[in-house]
Amino acid sequence: MSFAGQWISNYAGSNSGTIVVDIEYLGDRYHGVACVWDNQPDVPSTLVRFIIDSKAPLQTLQNIKTVPIVAGKVLTQEELHGWAQRAGFVFPNFTEITLNLQPPQLAICWKTSIGTHGATTAILSPACGGLPSVLQPIPKIRTWEAFKRYVSGLTPNQYVFRGQERAEWRIRTTFHRSNRCILEKFLTDDVKALNRVFSGLSSHKYNISDPNEYGAFLSLAQHHGYPTPLLDWTWSPYVAAFFAYRNLRNNRTSKRSDKVRILKFPAKHWNLKMRHFDGLFPYPQHVSLLEPLAIGNARAIPQQAIAMITNLDDIETYLSQWDERLEINVLEAIDLPAASRTEVMRDLALMGITAASLFPGLDGACEALREQNFGGRI
């Protein structure tokens, strides 16, 4: 039984909206950040930070400071005064919060210093429980040949793709897979440490206050193995196939039941219909696409890379909620036999898609030669 994870729910009370609560266990205490996003666009929303000192399932937190926010910005007192004058409202200074943990649910109630209140029961994101993906693959595409026929008929530059070596894996950023969820801590501590290291290793000095350079900075860290709130995608279905099959070995691919997965996402349609955010905190829940500059990142261009940036743990559930509204299947899956690895890697090599082309440098060249001379045997 644990408070840790990402909890999301609609709420009702004096106002209504959506609450997102992120809680991590650090040392011997829980640290939490909650964003209460008001449905009224003409009033600021609320951010609170709190600490839970014990593991008791019932907690009452008193005199918790409330911070006014709009998407991506903490308001200064002067800015808050301007909002209050325009909308005629009073923003509370403090709140009392009651948390009642009843896994997999968390009941949350609060009452502010001006008497406003709210309540909800939030559900822990299924991704935190390690549940497998519930996406059903496109039934007509079951072989490598069928996959090639299918993607050759797609309109170019409309979709992005992602390869995963296990069909049952739920899409999740490396940041959230690392049991982290407080993005404010990531942005203040992790990014600061990364920038300090990058400044000593890169000839380019990243201006992380610039959205374009910040995206390039995070993408470079992601491509070199640091957990980030980015999810790697590519414009090429064949590059996605390479990543799906890359790390498989013959001792696994001999199992007929094993499947790899290639995900398809309607990038152009999503960008036309959805509000885009470049940042992570404090922003409402979102999934946005980012094409970062390839500053210092020799891998980005050959991989035809595009990144999905998100503050959500359970991306799959969030995307599925938009299927009906957008009148499309937002996230589609294609499952292919893992046993087809030899055939797939041979075809991709003939297309020029190898580790040497996707990972310029000695490591990529050696991996490509290993594939050429040893295949999936090691």
Image (cartoon, helix red, strand yellow):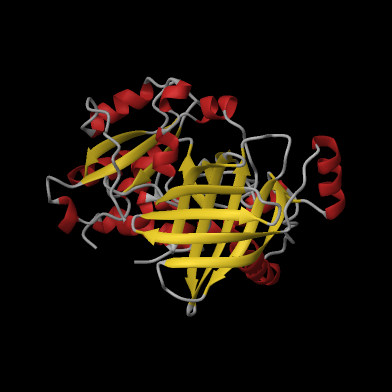
Q: Nearer the viewer, residue 175 or 376?
A: 175
Q: Nearer the viewer, residue 360 or 79?
A: 79
Q: Please say if 252 is above or below 348.
A: below
Percent across and percent down for residue 138 are 27, 29
Q: Quadrant of the C terminus?
A: bottom left
Q: In which quarter of the view is residue 262 placed? A: top left
Name the residue located 29 percent from the left edge and 51 percent from the top edge: 131
Q: Is residue 136 visible?
A: yes
Number of labels in the image equals 0
Name the residue located 47 percent from the left edge and 40 percent from the top edge: 234
Q: In which quarter of the view is residue 236 placed? A: top left
The residue at the far bottom in this view is 28
Percent across and percent down for residue 154 are 41, 22
Q: Is residue 263 left or right of residue 35?
A: left
Name the residue located 43 percent from the left edge and 49 percent from the top edge: 121
Q: Nearer the viewer, residue 167 or 88?
A: 88
Percent across and percent down for residue 199 are 70, 68
Q: Quadrant of the N terminus?
A: bottom left
Q: Nearer the viewer, residue 354 or 110?
A: 110
Percent across and percent down for residue 187 are 64, 61
Q: Is residue 36 left or right of residue 363?
A: right
Q: Is residue 239 visible?
A: no
